[in-house]
Structures are given as C-alpha cells and as structure tokens.
Image (cartoon, rainbow, N blue to C red):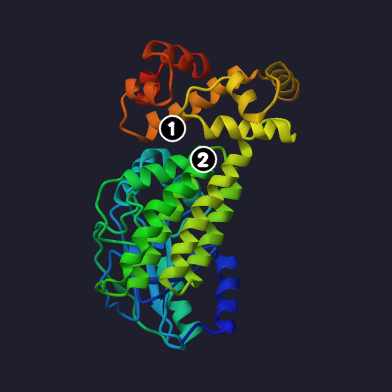
Amino acid sequence: MKTSSKTNAVLTHYCGAVRIPLSLFREKELVSRLPALADFNLPLLLMGCLDDELPPIWYCDTPEHLFFGGVLLEESGETLFLGPVMPFACSIRQADSVLSHIGRDVKDRQTLLNYFSGIPLCYEPTLLANLRFLDFLLNGMERRVLRLSFQWKELLPARQLSPFYPEAPKEDWIEKNILSCVKYGRVDSLRQFLNTNIMTASFKLDIPTPGDPMRTLRNYMFGANMLISHAAMDGGLDYGLGMQMSSEYIELIQSTDTVADLSALFSRLCLDYARRVAELRKLAGGSPLVRQINQYVWSHLYEKISPASAAGALGRNCTYLCTCFKKETGKTIANYIQECKVDEAKRLLEFGSLSIIEISELLCFTNPSYFCKIFKKWSGVSPARFRKG
C-alpha cells in the first residue's frame, strides 16, 4: 500500500516547517524525498548500511556525526527517513570522510558542504523529538526510539556505470567513456557507444539475480544519474539546471517499472545531459553553411582534414567557404579544426589510457612534437601537464 495523499501533504508541510530532509523507503527502495537537493543520495546510501529488519522507530549516527532516524508508517508499511543532519557545521575533514565512504572524491567537497549548510543544525535530542512527534502524528503511537549501531560499508558501485548488469566486468572503461562523452558534449559518439555496449548488455538481465532485481537496477541508476549530472556540470552545464535535471530523473527512475523501460531511460538520461553540454559548445552563428562545416569537422576528427577537404566534401569553393566561416564565427576553418582536435585530445587524455604519441597519431597530427605545440597553443599547457591535472 502506498502512502495516502493526506500523509504526503502532511509531510510536505512538515518538511517546509522544520527544513529537515525527509525520504520515504519501501523496504530498502527509495520511493520519494523532500526536498530535492544535491545530497549524493545520502539517505539511500545510509539505509544500505543498516540491517533489513528495522525496529518501528529508530535512530543512529555515523563516525562523522551524521544523525538520522526512521519511523515505520503503519498505514503503508513504508519507512519515513529523517536526515541526515548534523549538530554543528560540517567541517572539511568530516566532508572528506563522508565522500570517501560513498565513492566520491574531494572535488565534490563544496557541494556536500553546501548541502549541509542549507539544513538547520540539529542535536540528537531534537532529532529524537521529531521522530517521536511524527510517530504520534502519523501512527497515533508513543514509542521509544531505539538507537542502532552504524558502520559504513561498500554500497552502490557508483564508480561503475553498468546499471543493467550487476555482474558486468569491473573495468571502468564503460564509465569513463560515458562520462567523457557527457562532459564534452559528444552526442553522436555517446549514442553509438550506448547502442553497442549498454543496450546490448541490458538483455542479460533475463538471468535471475538474487533479491529484487528492479531495486538493484534502480540503485545503479541513482548512482549513474548522480555521476552523469556532475560530469555535465563539469562540462559547463549550469549548476541549478543540473540539479533540477538530476531530481527529475530520480523521479522518473522511481516511477519506472520494467527493465526495458529502465534501459531506455538510461540511454535517454545520458544523451539528454550530453545534448545540453553540446548546446553550450555550439559555434557562434547558426547558418546552414556553418552547421555543415561544424558537422564535417566533428565527423572527420580522426582523419587528416583541412579547409580544402571540407570545401571539397561540401561542394563549395574553398576561398568562399573560409570567408563565410570567418565572417560569421570570427574564426578561420584551419584554427577551428585545431581547436576541435585539441578538445578531443583533452577528452582522451583525461579519461583514456592512450599515450600522447598514440593520441597524436589517432588524431592525425604530423608528429607528436607538432601535436604538443598545437595542444599548448590552444590549452596553455602541454599534453603531459594537462593529464597530470
């Protein structure tokens, strides 16, 4: 049975009044949450560290002093999860410790600090009082809140984007390819990659898996959505828009009921983020001719291309083509080709394991020395320095 609309309305008003995050779980499956914040799915991750059988009303805290608790809703059988909250301002050391346990790195520190700064400080007695109040309000009961022990454990394989086949190989090449395509707005490359790798793998889900397969898949999807949204924001997507998209996809994941629909949703999610980034990287000027040149360059990035080859492919006079392109974009075609090749080289350096020489050959530079010269011209650093970060 699902939570009634009246209960949902009560919880919405309650969350607005006390500003403590609320989440609803059906067993260990996240059903909904208020408000939709960039919380790295902390309620889901924290619940995953607890036993499957929970008392009717409980609370616990992590070594980093994250306090959270839950109340069983007798009407629906769902668990209302409160928190996590902290009794004092989150320190950098605490944030880094939490990030390490949930498979994130320090570049996400500020996002986590921002999340906790938006939640009122809440001491243990206050959390217990809130749990007892909700138990009385929603269940008509006055029960003792039990304290549970807590220990972090490995939860979602958030660093392994294999959302449709939990037994997939542990190599992270799938994740790296997807994240790099999203960050750099490579829509066509991403579509081809998904069609040849992820979508094929999804059919393996016909193999029986222990537990609830849909819950497992949704959990993978939650982790994937979080990583992909951050890759898009790293690529220039507005932070607010990225968080909004992430929240919308969380709702879609929760409401999707079949493996086939989840598979389609994953592809849609990836491509949606990639398209948003690609829009930001569009050339100035939108004439059909400029779009044709742009398409030609990106479609032949791994070939030896020039203004003359572009003119020949498009059936245009080279001088006319170069003049029109420069007038509309402010760039020469030759320089634009170099920029695009360097942009692709950055992607390969950042996410791949190819050597600088291999990347130079792959992108059809005359020699590695010339590649390094052009790369530094457009990025300000050498390929080796860029790879080191």
Q: Determine crowd level at label 2: few under 14, some 14-19, many 20+ residues with C-alpha closer than 10 A.
A: some
Residue pictured at 40% horizontal, 63% vertical: 43
Could you tell me which secondary element the residue under label 1 belongs to?
helix
- Residue at which label 2 appears: 186
- Residue at which label 1 appears: 347
Figure quadrant of the C terminus: top left
Residue pictured at 46% horizontal, 48% vertical: 192
Q: Give the Cα separation between the discs numbered 1 and 2.
A: 10 Å
Residue 327 visible here: yes
Say above or below: 202 vs 360. below
Q: Nearer the viewer, residue 119 or 242?
A: 242
Q: Nearer the viewer, residue 37 or 87?
A: 37
Q: Nearer the viewer, residue 275 or 239?
A: 275
Report how many numbered discs are placed on residues in the image: 2
Q: Determine crowd level at label 1: few under 14, some 14-19, many 20+ residues with C-alpha closer than 10 A.
A: some
Amino acid marked by disc 1: Arg
Residue pictured at 51% horizontal, 40% vertical: 186
Residue 2: x percent and y percent? 49, 83
Say above or below: 290 vs 368. below
Residue pictured at 50% horizontal, 46% vertical: 114
Residue 131: x percent and y percent? 43, 74
First in sequence, mark 1 or 2: give its number: 2
Could you tell me which secondary element the residue under label 2 belongs to?
loop
Residue 157: x percent and y percent? 31, 55
Say above or below: 354 vs 59. above
Residue 100: x percent and y percent? 31, 46
- Which disc number belongs to residue 26? none
Say above or below: 37 vs 71. above
Q: Nearer the viewer, residue 176 or 73?
A: 176
Residue 81 visible here: no
Amino acid marked by disc 2: Arg
Q: Do the numbered discs 1 and 2 sit on residues whose CB atoms are within 8 Å?
A: yes
